[in-house]
Image (cartoon, rainbow, N blue to C red):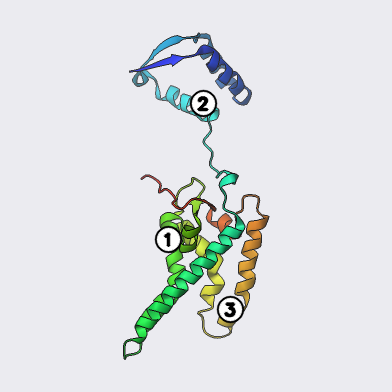
């Protein structure tokens, strides 16, 4: 049992504004409700006695009066320069780790396994993808206090993170391919990365091509929340 104290004047002010954007059927329902509400009215409401249709209608009206925003506040979007610097920091951090791991491999008198060499070479791509999916961050983003989020403000998850990585880094991945294809990929990588930066600058919500395709944004803050369930 819920006891709801309703201020009739306040409710009337809220609902009169709502009437401008609802259907005629909903408008009549609201007007009928207004007639039963007066100032300082005590309403004894038991939701268990309400029909599911009435509850669904009430939820719909509440969402119209207080719509939940599905976009990130533009004031919280990370500046482009901060994002570029974060990428540079991440690259340097992963490069230093790769040098250390390769140095450890050379300590063995035997030739290092190809699988180990490949895994270390792909460490920046795999590491950034995993960290972004898990917490919306990378080494550089964490240092500068920015993060990647989806449209609901949560960590992107694997699907969006993989899409981001593939769109951003496909020339880098092709560079591992032997022969002319790999050489071409190396040549176009700087131009592709520059194109992504330009797409961020020109977008009103600072979404680069990779963000648009993955449904993500980069905002201020070190930790992205995880969705429940």
The crowd level at tag 2 (other Cα within 10 Å; few <14, some 14-19, many 20+) is some
Q: For the point 40% across and 49% down, which residue is it?
A: 226
Instruction: Please say if 141 is above or below 50.
Output: below
At numbered mark 1, what does the secondary structure look like: helix, strand or loop? helix
The image position of residue 213, as x and y in percent, is 56, 57
User: Residue at 43% of width from left, 57% of height from top?
Assistant: 133
The residue beneath circle 3 is 186
- The residue closer to the viewer here, 57 or 210, is 210
Could you tell me which secondary element the residue under label 2 belongs to? helix
Question: Seen in the image, is 41 located left or right of residue 196?
Answer: left
Are the residues tagged 1 and 2 within 8 Å (C-beta)?
A: no
Q: CA distance from mark 1 to mark 2?
A: 39 Å
Residue drawn at 46 percent across, 63 percent down = 139
- Residue position for label 2: 61
- Where is 160 relative to 75, above or below? below
Q: Are marks 2 and 3 in contact (CB under 8 Å)?
A: no
Q: Quadrant of residue 130?
A: bottom left
| Residue 139 drawn above or below residue 150 | below
Read off the residue under disc 1: 131
Farthest-out residue, right = 202
Q: Nearer the viewer, residue 144 or 41?
A: 144
Crowding near the residue tagged with mark 1, few <14, some 14–19, many ≥20 C-alpha atoms within 10 Å:
some
Q: Nearer the viewer, residue 168 or 59?
A: 168
Q: Give the percent coordinates (x, y) of residue 169.
A: 54, 69
Nearest to the eye among marks 1 and 2: give it. Answer: 1
Residue 158 in sight: no
């Amino acid at each position: 049992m819920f006891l709801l104290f309703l201020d009739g004047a306040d409710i009337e002010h809220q609902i009169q504004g709502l009437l401008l954007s609802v259907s005629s059927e909903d408008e009549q329902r609201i007007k009928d409700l207004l007639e039963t509400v007066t100032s300082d009215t005590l309403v004894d409401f038991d939701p268990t006695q309400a029909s599911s249709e009435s509850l669904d209608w009430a939820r719909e009206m509440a969402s119209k009066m207080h719509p939940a925003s599905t976009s990130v506040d533009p004031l919280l979007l990370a500046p482009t320069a901060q994002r570029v610097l974060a990428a540079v920091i991440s690259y340097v951090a992963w490069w230093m780790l790769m040098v250390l791991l390769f140095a450890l491999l050379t300590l063995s008198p035997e030739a290092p396994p190809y699988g180990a060499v490949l895994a270390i070479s792909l460490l920046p791509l795999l590491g950034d993808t995993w960290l972004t999916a898990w917490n919306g961050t990378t080494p550089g983003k964490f240092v500068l206090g920015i993060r990647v989020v989806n449209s609901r403000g949560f960590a992107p998850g694997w699907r969006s993170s993989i899409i981001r990585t593939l769109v951003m880094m496909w020339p880098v991945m092709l560079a591992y391919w032997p022969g002319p294809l790999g050489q071409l990929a190396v040549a176009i990588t700087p131009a592709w990365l520059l194109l992504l930066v330009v797409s961020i600058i020109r977008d009103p919500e600072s979404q680069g091509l990779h963000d648009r395709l993955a449904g993500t944004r980069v905002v201020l803050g070190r930790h992205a929340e995880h969705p429940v369930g």
